[in-house]
Amino acid sequence: MAGLLSRIFGRRREQQTTSVEVMSGGPAFFTPFSGDAYESDIYRAAVDAIARNAAKLRGTHVVTSEQRRKTGDSSLNYLLQVRPNPYMTAYDLIYKLVTHYYLHSNAFAYLQKDERGNLIGIWPVRPQSMEYVVDGAGTLYCAFILAGGQKFTLPFSEVFVTRRFFNSNDLLGEANTAILPALDLAHTQSEGMENAIKAGATIRGLLKFNQVIAPDKLKAEKEAFINDYLTVSNNGGIAAIDQKADYIPLDPKPVAIDEKQLTAVKTKIYEYLGISEKIVNSTYTEDEWAAFYESVIEPLAVQFSLELTDKLFTQREKAFGNSIIFEANRLQFASNATKTNILKELMPLGLFTINQALDILNLPPVEDGDRRLQTLNVVNAEKADQYQLNDDLPNQEGTGNE
């Protein structure tokens, strides 16, 4: 493992650094949230719902100029869209980073570059601790301590960072301590239900002896009573006992579960994460999905896009329109009726190519499908002006000849 880490991070000379003094006055020091939120089945299912949907986002290097956008470097796009490192797919990487984001309110990844500054790998990092430090020249670094005790100090410019609840600390997101009471309550409810069900299923009667007997004798009498009368072999269903003991049957009632209380706790956890139960169990409507995308997935896409654009390109490259964008084909999640209406209204305007329309319908592309179809009822504005001017010329000439 140490060899793999050394190969990933390279042999880096230790810098003489000092801790960062942030404007908020607090230390710029990160330790993972210790509340074990991921052990809660409710919290884990909710985070999984967000992560698996966010992992559908497609990172792309684009170059935008004069309101036109074209796809950029193919090698960079392969890293962003297929395999960011030898051990993960792009889906795996985004899933893991989003999970870290919601569990620890901070997500980190090492942006591995070659000698020329080109990206050659993205590695998610889950440190035991991380501290922001600066060297004598004021350059910002991230000093990581990993689970095995290995220490690596990386330039901030080579570390992908996203933060949630970005408030009191100038460089780090807040811990998830605010949700601990709800998680504790959910755990207590689960344990209470389990214990009540076990108790109701195991104790079915009391055998009360009218005299004091030794513990070993008491246990033997109980076992004999069970074997004689409480087994399926007792076909008559009748027990005969003398005055030395009384059998008091118990009528265990089913455990009453307060559904309103359970729902209230679950809703509190879901609201903390900004989602609904229908998103978690995949019973959402088209409008509910759109709201989830705009309020949860899209903000993540914006964060990922801005962070990678800043960390992967120089100021000059960004000035020439280089950027990273994360987006998804939202129309793929629309109903067939919505898809049909959109294509019916917009294809005649030439806004979609044939293959783009097929992609919206989840159909494979066809040969020569990258051309746009446009109805003759829609005319280019410049040609319309020219047509009108030409139409007016005969009238003007006729007026002059009269």
Image: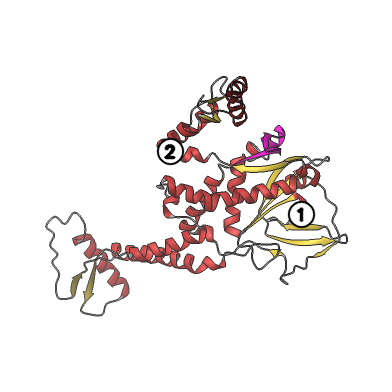
Q: Residue at x 30, y 63 (%)?
A: 202
- The quarter in which the C terminus is drawn is top right
Rendering coords of residue 336 (x, y %):
41, 35
Residue 350 seen in render: yes
Vertically, is 151 above or below 338? below
Rendering coords of residue 343 (x, y %):
47, 32
Which residue is labeled 1 in the image?
156
Residue 86 seen in render: no
Q: Residues within 10 Å of mark 2 (few under 14, many from 20)?
A: few
Rendering coords of residue 206 (x, y %):
23, 71
Residue extent of the magenta highlight: 58-78
Residue 66 inside the magenta-drawn segment: yes
Q: Amino acid at mark 1?
A: Phe
Q: Which mark is residue 338?
A: 2
Q: Residue at x 80, y 42 (%)?
A: 117
Viewer-proximal residue, 331 or 236?
331
- In the picture as drawn, the residue positioned furthest to the front comes out as 402
Vertically, is 68 above or below 245? above
- In the picture as drawn, the residue positioned furthest to the right comes out as 136
Viewer-proximal residue, 250 or 383?
383
Q: Residue at x 76, y 54 (%)?
A: 156
Q: Tag 1, which secondary structure?
A: helix
Q: Amino acid at mark 2?
A: Thr
Q: Which of pointers 1 and 2 indicates the residue nearer the eye?
A: 2
